[in-house]
Amino acid sequence: MVSSIIDTDVAIFGAGPAGACAALSLLNHTNLDITLIEQSDLNRERIGEHVTECIFDFIDYLKIKPENFGPDCFIPTFDSTSYWGSDLPGMRNSVFTAQQSTFQLNREQFDLQLLENIAERGGRVMPRTHCQQINQWEDGRWQLKLSHPVHGAFILRARFIVDASGRNANISRQLGLTGKKVDDLMAVGRFFECTSDEQKKQEYLIESTEHGWWYGALLPNNQYSICFFSDADIVSNLRLNQQSHFNALLAQTKHIKKLVKETKVTTPHPWVRQAYSQSNAFESLPNFLAIGDAACAFDPISSMGIGFALSSGCHAANLIAANLTDTDSNQEQLINQFQMDLNNQFDHYLTLRQQFYQQEGRWQQAPFWQRRHAKITTLQSEEVSA
């Protein structure tokens, strides 16, 4: 039974960097009422993130001081090595960015600080809240039936809604929107705690293998995050969700295994996360936008995820502000341009992604690498052929 009705200007689904950035941008530059809705209880363990110094530009735009995130949120990465296409080490920054200073990000501290700032600036944050039903009225406003385990069911009415719910794009799917999925990449990983007092190098390492590629990085909390990336069917066939199979494959690496020589496992079983590339189309709906991974999701090899999340959140906030506060703005034109910009960025990413994967030619008959070497149809070429 519905117990209450809440009115808001903008409802944002997803409390990750994209949704939080959009909320903060709107709170900083408008007088709009903002509600941020998150399914989880905000206690999910984050994997960590490798970022460039550009992140400090976004933090400054959001009017947050870097020191507010704590001393261990941004750890400089001084050594980055890849074994890709050769057994010889190569120094790299990331595939798609210019050479800049890089940092290992403590995602838990980063995300929670953004949410604290939203609450301090008058935003409404609703964790553990699920969307059960979405309806759009003829005037373009939205009625959302939400549920909370303690407060029960209630109605949220919004002038504009934003899907920042991540790769699954739950809100977009509920609205019947479809996307272009490029691959079935998954990440399987474990956390390892350093047991020696020896000072570890602030580094990350990438190593390609027959069935995919490994990523290892020292996190700000003195833990190593060790992840293996491959396609869903390969992960299933190798039974990598079982610790014995994961450990056996890790032991076959030449370099990643050395990172965890003096460590102990902190996770009882390997965790499994989606990591596929996709692009979603949303220009057909008024008063709706998708941002972050819900709009475009990138291969983690690109190091584009959090940068895109923040930039798309900022751009979407500007568009929403124009739509809701400027009576002369052309909403359809603004959303179409936003979608076109995302499509162009995703097409550029696909081209660079293929070029990078083609640098690895040692396992050309292996299914994972055959799929990465196959030609990918860009969004623009699909439009031309259509």
Image (spheres, rainbow, N blue to C red):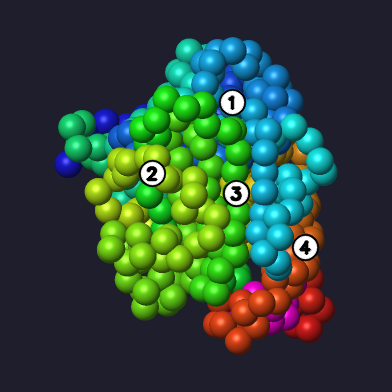
Residue 191, label in figure: 2
Check disc 3 and give the amino acid type: Leu
Is residue 17 found left or right of 270 in the rendered image?
right
Distance in Å between CA atoms under marks 3 and 4: 20 Å
Check disc 1 and give the amino acid type: Phe
**In the foreground, 240 or 380:** 240
Residue 244: horizontal and vertical position, in percent?
Answer: 28, 63
Q: Which residue lies furthest to the bottom in this view?
A: 365
Check disc 4 and give the amino acid type: Leu
**In the foreground, 180 or 277:** 277
Q: The C terminus appears in which quarter of the rendering? A: bottom right
Dot 1 alpha-carbon crowd within 10 angstroms: few under 14, some 14 to 19, many 20 or more: many
Q: Tag 4 or tag 2, which sits nearer the N-term?
A: 2
Residue in view at x 35 percent, y 53 percent: 271
Q: Is residue 376 magenta?
A: yes
Distance in Å between CA atoms under marks 2 and 1: 19 Å
Residue 74, label in figure: 1
The residue wearing badge 3 is 205
Q: Tag 4 or tag 1, which sits nearer the N-term?
A: 1
- Evaluate whether residue 316 shows in this view: no
Per the image, label 1 sits on a secondary structure element best described as strand
Per the image, label 2 sits on a secondary structure element best described as strand
The residue wearing badge 4 is 352
> Magenta region: which residues?
371-378
Check disc 2 and give the amino acid type: Phe
